[in-house]
């Protein structure tokens, strides 16, 4: 099995990368929002819908295929690189000539130039894609940290300077392009792999037979995600959509940082052990337990402290978003089940199952969405909890046979952490009614909640707590050793 210290170290670097990028982007977004008019954000949002869909086609699932393949070599990587570059140029050419049609659809002629410039991201992504797969496969996640940090800082400077110079929406366009370009450039300078003058259609075909199913799965998910926003905006007011989106923002930032970090490290780790189903099962179980142990208190703490957090950070005018925030917290708390099960399925090479599951989940999701649409946005949000339960069952179903790890086994594994997190949240909830300054109230809730969760973990001797403490201690020992060596 992959060395535990190596896995945890790579998770740390991936998590640090995501957190660093999110914090910087959050600060920059506040600065830019004070300088730019809301219209600029509305304009860029229209174009980003297309770039997100194009980004799905850029990968073509071949990046995951390179990570999953047991003996991927330079011929595999080079073949994918050259295919990606040609494919990205074709996609950009199509977008370039379709830009006037997009502008006409939105009745905004200025979109033509914006689409043509912003969609250059597709070409840059083609250069980055294989390097990114190489870093993931070889588990050099420290490279991602420096690349992302460089891109985020450079794009922050470019966006703010152009905004101050009156560039308007072009400041946001430059921010996106500079971020990806610098990120890609740093990866090319720090990662040793370079494409060789070799190409094999046979190898490409083999990789694509695995990857195309992931491509379709990702495309379905992207379209489905944007469809929900479109329906709310169409049938209800812009305020309803704003409260819904704002309610998603806080839990989504937390979950994305943790989930992407786990997802990036887990797939290559599992793929190396794909022939030993018992080891894959142990990794899946460990991932679900530990991830839930970390995720549950964060989600329940945020849900029970939602009123205080929203009033302090967004002001009272955003309080209608609180119910949505709480619903998203409950939904996201179970994401470790989705992530670990799907990575196990991909790691053992069953991308066909991955696609089938995606189709079933989205069919159930659409049925719930269209049955709740007539009863208000809040009912649509509650429908997401029902959908989440269905998705958990669907995602875990194959692993009952593949790994001998059923959904009920998984629920039993996470119930102690979730039960303790709910108890912790209920304890701190009452503090929200004490008439004291918001900052002090939130500080008391956070400290008390953390103390209750840690004390409860020790009292009930939760296995995940002991595992996390063991990892923390090993890091401290390693840090002290490095310090002594320097001395």
Image (cartoon, rainbow, N blue to C red):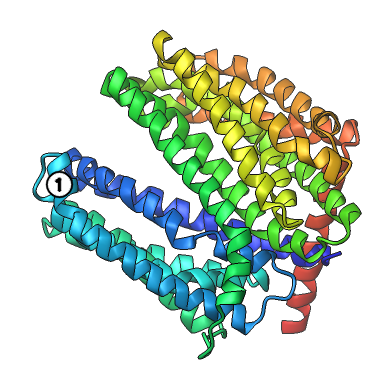
Tell me the SS state at disc 1: helix
Q: Quadrant of the C terminus?
A: bottom right
Classify residue 453 by image quadrant: top right
Q: Which quadrant does the N terminus fall into?
A: bottom right
Residue 136 seen from this side? no
Residue at left offset 15%, top offset 46%: 103
- Give the answer, above or below, for where 25 lies relative to 93: above
Q: Quadrant of residue 97?
A: bottom left
Front residue of this view, candidates 439 and 213: 213
Across and down, in percent, residue 425 comes to 66, 23
The picture quadrant where one finds residue 78 is: bottom right
Left of 400 or right of it: where is 50? left
Residue 191, image x and y in percent?
Answer: 55, 81
Answer with left or right where residue 147 lies relative to residue 46: right
Q: Say which residue appears at 53% left-offset and 17% top-offset.
A: 382
For label 1, count other residues whose C-alpha is less than 10 Å away and answer few (under 14), some (14-19) or many (20+). some
Q: Among all residues in the image, which is located at the extreme top?
A: 375
Q: Farthest residue toward the left? A: 109
Indicate left or right for 214 with 377 as reference: right
Q: Where is residue 92 in the image (x, y as percent from the top left)?
A: 29, 64
Q: How many labels does the image show?
A: 1
- Comparing 29 with 382, the one in front is 382
Q: Mark 1 points at which residue?
A: 103
Please tell me whether residue 487 is drawn above or below residue 313 in the rendered image.
below
- Which residue shows up at 33% across the image and 20% down it? 240
Residue in the picture at 89% in, 31% down: 459
Q: Position of residue 260 (x, y in %)?
A: 59, 51
In this orientation, which residue lies closer to the viewer: 469 or 394? 394
Pick whichever, 364 or 244, lies toward us. 364
Residue 450 in view in this figure: yes
């Amino acid at each position: 099995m992959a060395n535990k210290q190596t896995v945890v170290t790579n998770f740390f670097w991936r998590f640090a990368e995501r957190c660093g990028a999110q914090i910087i982007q959050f600060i920059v977004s506040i600065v830019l929002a004070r300088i730019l008019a809301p219209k600029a954000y509305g304009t860029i949002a229209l174009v980003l819908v297309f770039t997100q869909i194009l980004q799905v086609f850029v990968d073509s699932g071949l990046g995951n295929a390179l990570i999953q393949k047991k003996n991927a070599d330079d011929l595999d990587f080079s073949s994918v690189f050259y295919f990606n570059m040609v494919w990205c140029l074709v996609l950009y050419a199509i977008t370039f000539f379709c830009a006037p049609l997009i502008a006409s659809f939105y009745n905004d002629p200025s979109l033509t130039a914006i689409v043509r410039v912003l969609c250059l991201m597709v070409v840059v992504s083609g250069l980055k894609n294989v390097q990114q797969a190489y870093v993931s496969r070889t588990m050099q996640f420290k490279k991602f940290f420096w690349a992302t940090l460089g891109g985020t800082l450079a794009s922050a400077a470019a966006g703010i300077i152009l905004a101050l110079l009156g560039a308007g929406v072009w400041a946001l366009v430059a921010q996106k392009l500079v971020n990806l370009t610098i990120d890609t450039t740093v990866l090319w300078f720090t990662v040793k792999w370079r494409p060789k003058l070799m190409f094999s259609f046979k190898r490409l075909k083999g990789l694509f037979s695995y990857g195309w199913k992931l491509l379709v799965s990702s495309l379905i998910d992207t379209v489905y995600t944007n469809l929900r926003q479109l329906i709310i905006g169409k049938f209800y007011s812009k305020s309803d959509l704003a409260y819904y989106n704002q309610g998603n923002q806080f839990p989504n930032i937390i979950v994305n940082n943790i989930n992407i970090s786990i997802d990036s490290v887990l797939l290559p780790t599992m793929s190396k052990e794909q022939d030993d189903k018992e080891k894959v099962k142990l990794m899946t179980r460990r991932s679900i337990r530990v991830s839930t142990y970390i995720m549950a208190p964060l989600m329940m703490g945020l849900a029970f402290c939602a009123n205080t957090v929203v009033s302090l950070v967004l002001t009272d005018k955003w309080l209608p978003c609180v119910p949505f925030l709480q619903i998203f917290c409950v939904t996201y708390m179970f994401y470790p089940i989705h992530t670990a099960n799907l990575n196990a399925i991909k790691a053992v090479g069953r991308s066909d199952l991955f696609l089938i599951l995606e189709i079933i989940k989205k069919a159930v999701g659409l049925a719930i969405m269209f049955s709740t649409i007539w009863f208000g946005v809040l009912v649509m949000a509650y429908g997401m909890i029902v959908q989440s339960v269905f998705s958990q069952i669907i995602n875990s179903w194959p692993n009952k046979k593949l790994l001998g790890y059923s959904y009920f086994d998984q629920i039993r594994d996470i119930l102690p952490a979730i039960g303790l997190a709910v108890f912790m949240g209920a304890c701190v909830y009452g503090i929200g009614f004490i008439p004291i300054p918001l900052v002090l109230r939130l500080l008391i809730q956070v400290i008390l909640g953390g103390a209750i969760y840690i004390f409860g973990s020790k009292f009930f001797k939760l296995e995940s707590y002991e595992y996390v403490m063991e990892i923390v201690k090993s890091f401290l020992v390693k840090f002290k050793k490095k310090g002594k060596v320097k001395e």
